[in-house]
Amino acid sequence: MSAILVHDHSRKAMLERALAAGSLLPVFQPVVRVDTLEVVAHEGLSRCAFMPADITILDLLDLARMEGRLADVELHAARTICHAFAAQMDSGRLLVNLSAHAILQDAMRPDEVLFALTASGLDPARVTIEVTERDVVEDPARLAHALGYLRAHGVRIALDDFGNGHSNFEMWNEIHPDVVKIDRYLIHGISRSAGRLAIVRSLCQVAETLGTDLVGEGVEDLADLRVLRDLGVPFAQGFLIGRPAPGVVSEASAEAKQLLRTPSVPVLPRPRGPVTQRPTQVGHLLMEAPAVHSRQTNEEVMALFVDHPELHAVAVVNDGHPIGLINRRLANERMAQPFARELLARKSCTALMNAAPLVCDEQRSLESLADVLRGEDQRYLADGFIVTSGGRYRGLGTGEALVRRVSELRIDAARHANPLTFLPGNIPTTEHLERLLGGCERFAVVHVDLTDFKPFNDHYGYARGDEMIRLLSSLLSEHVDPALDFVGHIGGDDFIVLFQSPDWEARCERAVAAFNLRSPHLFDPADIARGGLRGQDRRGAPQFYPFTTVVMGAVALSPPLPLRAQPITKLAARAKRHAKRIGVGVHVLARATAADA
């Protein structure tokens, strides 16, 4: 029920009843240290004991705001919560919600707030005020001054629901909170959202710089709690840890305690699909250039090239829509032939145009043109391409600029995610290995490679080779536990799998068997019949290559773990080479420790 639908008389009656003794029921939700799950505080909340079920405490606060009595209701709730908390003789901290709007009301002085918090005998040094704000704070500096009075008496200050509503960086900078509570929106599902992860990771860096403690609110999933632990968020709160209840609790829930029994390092979510630092569109390569109509003659086109020596080509349009492209160099060569000017000068310019040029909308991403770079028709390298907007001509782009920029984007992206498989590349693979070294007890590093892949790729071409690499990528991903194991594509046909699954050797054997069963289907029927390819070795001598298979070299690590990642990857590469030499699918080095690495 909306507060605005309640009649004036009813609103006043509800507020008077809300301010009566026993009208609000205090409940408490635990806050824990993430690393130990020790309960260190409780947030005090209020429930309406007298309101209809469809009216919440937020509706009551809206009513109070409309009647100008928000401060009265919030102070009454704070007194009720503090009395109930003090009666339970808990030694932890109490978090009490007060809105910035209420604190800044003229009728409410910091003295009254302090009295409401301490009338029960509660030490103000054990109280943290959570500044909640559903409205814009017009004067954060004034709020900071009011909070300074409370802070001088030992009260700590928290900024609530950061990342939602009006809890923002201006408030963080102005009121200098001791604690910032990250809103549930950013925490719930963080184990599955690369975007949420990036935001919270940035907040951790800001908090460390400003000396602020963070609390992750709305924790309902053990996987999310693991990510918070991995990020170093010190405190957490949510239904997984404990639901609001009339009494305080001394322990987190049994479900949350599973975190302490699982020392595994979470596999953090990553963006799906091509990764670039910044979206770059075709329009960013646009060069404004004149166009010609199909009715214009070749003589007019040549005159245009003389007037615009910078043009590499000119577009041919009809009613604003491009129908072809005339390459300057090719047109000059054609017109320089004997009798060409006499025969072609007065004819339509369509006689010299490429009728199937590369045409791109200005909003198309450059990354999407990667397939064009690999295509058989390479005329765009000399012709360039036409840029359109909604199908209408806008200008030109050069093939050189396109190749250069797409190559830069793909090289940069490949450092973070392989552009063929979209799996994490070298940098995130190394980062995850270093996280395992810093926070895991036992894990395995597996280097994955294909046998006789180069002859297959040379014989069938890159498209078929890419198909085989994607097959390996999908099978590796199918045979790992995504919550524990990390698959990285470090280049070409080389992959790294970082296993925390205890049955990792069996998973490797199953992946090898699955690939070796399916890879022959990528060969032509004649090659399948003979069991492989006929080709040449490096010296040009005839050689027979059997079906491409997969080999894995593994290093199983146990404490004490090495300090650096590089020696481990070298060991895994050595194990992979040994697997190739002896012709086995999986070769495991003896269990390695820091001394071995």
Image: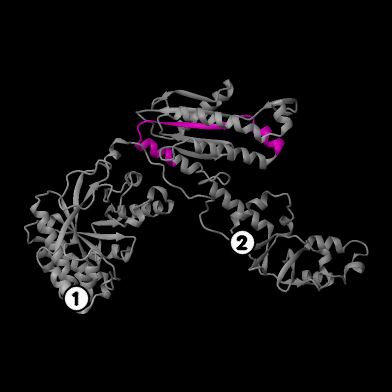
Q: Residue furthest front?
A: 52
Q: Where in the figure is residue 454, as x and y percent of width and height?
A: 66, 34
Q: Which amino acid does the dot numbered 2 rest on?
A: Val
Chain-order first, disc 1 or disc 2: 1
For this view, does 13 lie left or right of residue 208? Answer: left
Q: Where in the figure is residue 177, as x and y percent of width and height?
A: 24, 60
Residue 309 can be seen in this image:
no
Residue highlighted by disc 1: 10
Q: Is residue 427 magenta?
A: no
Q: Residue drawn at (30%, 53%), measured in percent from left and top?
A: 218
For this view, does 376 lie left or right of residue 72? Answer: right
Q: Which amino acid does the dot numbered 1 rest on?
A: Ser
Pick the residue in front: 186 or 580.
Answer: 186
Looking at the rendered structure, the secondary structure element under dot 1 is helix
Residue highlighted by disc 2: 282
Q: Is residue 454 magenta?
A: yes
What is the magenta range?
A: 431-460
Picture layout, residue 42 above or below residue 58: above
Q: Where in the figure is residue 482, as x and y percent of width and height?
A: 44, 40
Q: Residues within 10 Å of mark 1 (few under 14, many from 20)?
A: few
Q: Where in the figure is residue 49, as x and y percent of width and height?
A: 16, 62
Pick the residue in front: 375 or 511.
Answer: 511
Numbered label attached to residue 202: none
Residue 279 can be seen in this image:
yes
Q: Residue furthest top?
A: 582
